């Protein structure tokens, strides 16, 4: 796992200084970090080893990786900001035997939210378009292919109901299709897939209540929504 320097204030101080200059010398950075030479040497070496800082003759500068990382910094608080996760959520619909609306649901078989039911989806990868990410996730997790269309941006925040602690902050880019091809993968390492009606989905106690919104919002043509949900932290 790639090391991230957010845990130590000395490294954050070095990154902050380099964020506002093209490069800086040893003495200038040491003064900014306000530590001894030995301590500074240790931390600047760690930043160089991990690819966040480059040494250029007698000076130091942010690498491309370091620029990307340091740009997430709250320069007033001198800390790296956490940001919402961006994920894809896919609503795949079909007509059931009796003509009722059925949707493809997925039960998580991994943490967090182990055993919870929700929509098919996953994280976007670096450089993907929204539709590329959706098609990849759908194929990987269900074996199906579909002509997905973008419908909704859904901002979801999950809190612990007892303490009010923020557990998850996610932005879902919601995609939709009502036709598909391929053979459904019913079970895989991270979960299992099942067609059911919206009413059947609501009988499961462990379910993402945000999914209750998706059908109605899409049916109404809503393109943006924000919601808050509360869970027991033990469910996370």
Image (cartoon, rainbow, N blue to C red):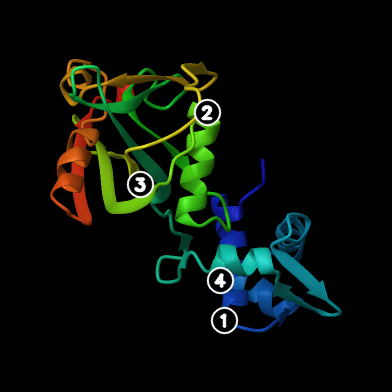
Residue named by callout 2:
143
Residue named by callout 3:
175
Residue 136 placed where, x, y %? 54, 41
Task: Please say whether residue 40 is visible from this viewpoint.
Answer: yes
Which numbered mark, 3 or 4, is in the foreground of this view?
A: 3
User: Disc 1 and disc 4: Cα gap in Å?
Assistant: 7 Å
Q: Which of 203 and 41 is in front in this view?
A: 203
User: Disc 2 and disc 1: Cα gap in Å?
Assistant: 48 Å
Tell me the tag on residue 20: 1
Q: Alpha-carbon neighbours of circle 1 within 10 Å: few (<14), some, or many (≥20)?
A: few
Which numbered mark, 3 or 1, is in the foreground of this view?
A: 3
Report the residue that reaches farthest toward the bottom: 22
Residue 197 placed where, x, y %? 21, 22
Instruction: Look at the numbered disc 2 and give the secondary structure of its residue.
Output: loop
Circle 2/circle 1 CB separation < 8 Å: no
User: Disc 3 and disc 4: Cα gap in Å?
Assistant: 38 Å
In primary-sequence order, the first of circles 3 and 1 is: 1
Q: Alpha-carbon neighbours of circle 4 within 10 Å: few (<14), some, or many (≥20)?
A: many
**In which quarter of the view is residue 229 placed?**
top left
The residue that appears at 71% across and 59% down in the rendered structure is 47
User: Disc 3 and disc 2: Cα gap in Å?
Assistant: 17 Å
User: Disc 3 and disc 1: Cα gap in Å?
Assistant: 40 Å
In primary-sequence order, the first of circles 2 and 4 is: 4
Circle 1/circle 4 CB separation < 8 Å: yes
Tell me the tag on residue 16: 4
Q: In the picture, which quadrant includes the C terminus?
A: top left
Q: In this view, does 9 lie above or below 233?
A: below
User: Disc 2 and disc 4: Cα gap in Å?
Assistant: 46 Å
Q: Alpha-carbon neighbours of circle 3 within 10 Å: few (<14), some, or many (≥20)?
A: many
């Amino acid at each position: 796992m790639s090391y991230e320097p957010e845990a130590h204030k000395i490294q954050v101080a070095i990154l902050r200084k380099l964020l506002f200059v093209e490069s800086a010398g040893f003495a200038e950075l040491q003064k900014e970090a306000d530590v001894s030479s030995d301590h500074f040497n240790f931390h600047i070496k760690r930043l160089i080893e991990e690819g966040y800082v480059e040494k250029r003759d007698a000076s130091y500068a942010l690498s491309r990786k370091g620029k990307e990382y340091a740009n997430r910094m709250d320069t007033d608080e001198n800390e790296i900001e956490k940001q919402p996760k961006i994920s894809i959520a896919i609503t795949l619909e079909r007509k059931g035997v009796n003509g009722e609306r059925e949707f493809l649901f997925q039960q998580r078989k991994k943490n967090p939210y182990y055993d919870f039911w929700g929509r098919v989806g996953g994280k976007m990868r670096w450089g993907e378009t929204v539709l590329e990410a959706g098609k990849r996730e759908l194929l990987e997790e269900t074996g199906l292919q579909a002509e997905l269309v973008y419908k909704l941006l859904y901002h979801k925040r999950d809190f612990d109901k007892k303490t009010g602690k923020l557990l998850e902050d996610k932005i879902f880019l919601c995609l939709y299709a009502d036709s598909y091809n391929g053979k459904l993968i019913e079970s895989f390492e991270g979960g299992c897939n099942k067609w059911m009606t919206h009413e059947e989905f609501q009988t499961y106690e462990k379910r993402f209540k945000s999914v209750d919104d998706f059908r109605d919002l899409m049916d109404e043509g809503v393109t943006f929504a924000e919601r808050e949900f509360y869970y027991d932290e033990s469910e996370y």
